[in-house]
């Protein structure tokens, strides 16, 4: 039991993984129950008005949401990289490397979201001459 400290990163990673998977599971169960409700309403012959259907069906994210979340992820990634660099200079090198790697992952996620925003935004209207 003298090396219990080595289990801490493993347990943190395990708890984060379990939390994310539990969120995916509950989201899938919620969507499944919504679909079952819609099937029962349609099978009973009732008509669905447009507002009820919009409440039950999630609309896809707009390009502006990709821009917003991309900028946030990119900023957080750069902040983690900077904090990791400072930590490597002054304190423990292992923790600084972990923060830098976390920052790199967040920055690449932000770049991907910004790329998605760039590809999905509507083209500007050309001016007739």
Image: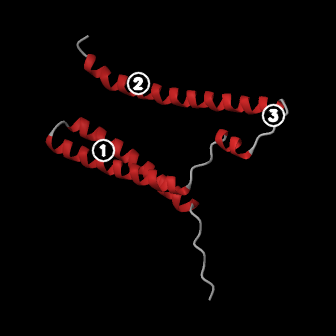
Cβ atoms at labels 2 and 1 below 8 Å apart: no
Residue nearest the viewer, comparing 37 with 84: 37
Q: Residues within 10 Å of mark 1 (few under 14, many from 20)?
A: many
Quote the CA–CA distance across marks 2 and 1: 21 Å
Quote the CA–CA distance across marks 2 and 3: 41 Å
Cβ atoms at labels 2 and 3 below 8 Å apart: no
The quadrant in which the C terminus is found is: bottom right
Q: Nearer the viewer, mark 2 or mark 3?
A: 3
How many dots with numbers?
3
Residue drawn at 41 percent across, 24 percent down: 15
Asked where in the image residue 11 lies, by quadrant, the reply is top left
Residue ID for mark 2: 15
Q: Identify the secondary structure beneath mark 3.
A: helix
Residue drawn at 51 percent across, 26 percent down: 22
Q: Identify the secondary structure beneath mark 1.
A: helix
Q: Position of residue 8 (x, y in %)?
A: 30, 23
Residue ID for mark 1: 100
The quadrant in which the N terminus is found is: top left
How was this image coloured?
secondary structure
Residue ID for mark 3: 42
């Amino acid at each position: 039991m003298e090396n219990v400290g080595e289990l801490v990163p493993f347990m943190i990673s395990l708890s984060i993984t379990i939390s994310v998977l539990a969120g995916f599971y509950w989201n899938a169960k919620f969507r499944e129950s919504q679909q079952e409700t819609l099937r029962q309403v349609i099978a009973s012959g009732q008509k669905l008005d447009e507002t009820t259907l919009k409440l039950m069906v999630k609309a896809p994210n707009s390009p502006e949401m990709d821009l917003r979340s991309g900028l946030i992820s990119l900023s957080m990634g750069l902040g983690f990289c900077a904090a990791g660099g400072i930590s490597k200079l002054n304190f423990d090198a292992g923790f600084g490397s972990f923060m830098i790697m976390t920052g790199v992952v967040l920055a690449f996620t932000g770049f991907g979201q910004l790329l998605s925003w760039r590809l999905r935004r509507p083209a500007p209207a050309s001016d007739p001459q």
